[in-house]
Image: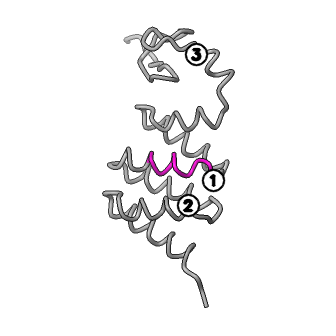
Amino acid sequence: MGEVTLLHYCTWCFAEIPAGTTICPDCGTNLDDYARHTPYQDRLIHALHHPLIETHIAAILALCKQADPKTINALTDCALEHDGDVIEGLEILHSLSLMPTGSPLKAALQRLASDHPAHAVRMHAARQLESRFTETS
């Protein structure tokens, strides 16, 4: 049987790098310093652009648990950047459903309801927008 090689990526530029690398040969980032000195939430937001879907889904789930309104724009941008992934778009909408109601959330839901190419994402965003921002008598 062949040897299994695990892929490793630079946490800054996402270039494939050998296991155990401490300085990225592509961008020069000191990976230990990046991990130690970059706030966790900032690393999660950056990971939303990782080439592996498993990595950005993990970042979405971790950001969801934080329910921090400061992440609304990053999550919305991620949904629009990976616009062919309906499951990811729906997971981001789930994350947004846990965010406090306010103008950043309303703007994000409006963007997704109008700009996302996937019908399911647009409809879920529109429903969330209606249920959270329509005044009841």
The residue labelled by disc 1 is 69
The residue labelled by disc 3 is 31
Disc 1 + disc 2, Cβ < 8 Å: yes
Q: Position of residue 93 (x, y in %)?
A: 50, 58
Q: Position of residue 56 (x, y in %)?
A: 49, 38
Q: Who's the residue at 56% across and 52% down the image? A: 72
Q: Residues within 10 Å of mark 1 (few under 14, many from 20)?
A: some
Which quarter of the rendered picture does the N terminus lie within?
top left
Mark number, residue 15: none
Tag 2 or tag 1, which sits nearer the N-term? 1
Determine the secondary structure under disc 1: helix
Which quarter of the rendered picture does the C terminus lie within?
bottom right
Q: Amino acid at mark 3?
A: Leu
Residue 51 location, quadrant:
top left
Magenta highlight on residue 52: no
Q: Nearer the viewer, mark 3 or mark 1?
A: 1
Which residues are drawn in magenta? 70-78
Q: Amino acid at mark 2?
A: Leu
The residue labelled by disc 2 is 105
